[in-house]
């Protein structure tokens, strides 16, 4: 169970990283991969973005979600030991 959850969390982190790279290359998603990463990650980022608006043009919501996923991954991996 923990292995499957770890794989899902790693895949989500990969989507977040790909989205971050694409946001520098093309800010408006046109590419299929970029659209997919936005569709997968936006349901998690948008609620955080409503609570924590961008500061100085930097989207803190993305960082908060990424750190939260890292923490959840650590909890899952430590529970599986």
Image (cartoon, rainbow, N blue to C red):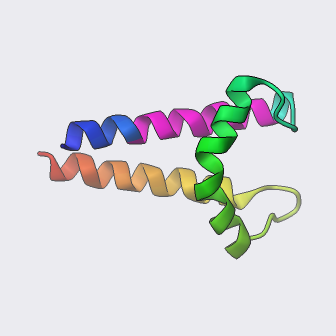
Quarter of the image with the C terminus in it: top left
Q: Position of residue 37 (x, y in %)?
A: 64, 36
Q: Is residue 30 above or below residue 48?
A: above
Q: Is residue 18 above or below residue 49?
A: above
Question: In front: 16, or 71?
Answer: 16
Snapshot quadrant of residue 20: top right
Q: Is residue 6 magenta?
A: no
Q: Is residue 33 left or right of residue 1?
A: right
Quarter of the image with the N terminus in it: top left
Q: Is residue 22 magenta?
A: yes
Q: Position of residue 21 (x, y in %)?
A: 72, 30
User: What span is in magenta?
Assistant: 9-23
Question: In front: 70, or 45?
Answer: 45
At a point 76% along the width and 30% down the height, the residue shown is: 22
Q: Position of residue 66 (x, y in %)?
A: 55, 50
Question: In front: 33, or 75?
Answer: 33
Q: Is residue 44 above or below residue 1?
A: below
At a point 61% along the width and 47% down the height, the residue shown is: 41
At a point 86% along the width and 30% down the height, the residue shown is: 26
Q: Is residue 23 left or right of residue 56?
A: left
At a point 82% along the width and 65% down the height, the residue shown is: 55
Most common SS among magenta residues: helix
């Amino acid at each position: 169970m923990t292995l499957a959850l770890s794989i899902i969390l790693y895949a989500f982190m990969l989507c977040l990283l790909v989205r971050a790279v694409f946001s520098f290359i093309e800010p408006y998603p046109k590419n299929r991969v970029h659209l997919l990463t936005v569709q997968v990650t936006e349901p998690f980022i948008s609620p955080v973005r409503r609570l924590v608006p961008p500061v100085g043009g930097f989207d803190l919501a993305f960082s908060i979600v990424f750190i939260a996923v890292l923490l959840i991954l650590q909890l899952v991996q430590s529970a599986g030991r």
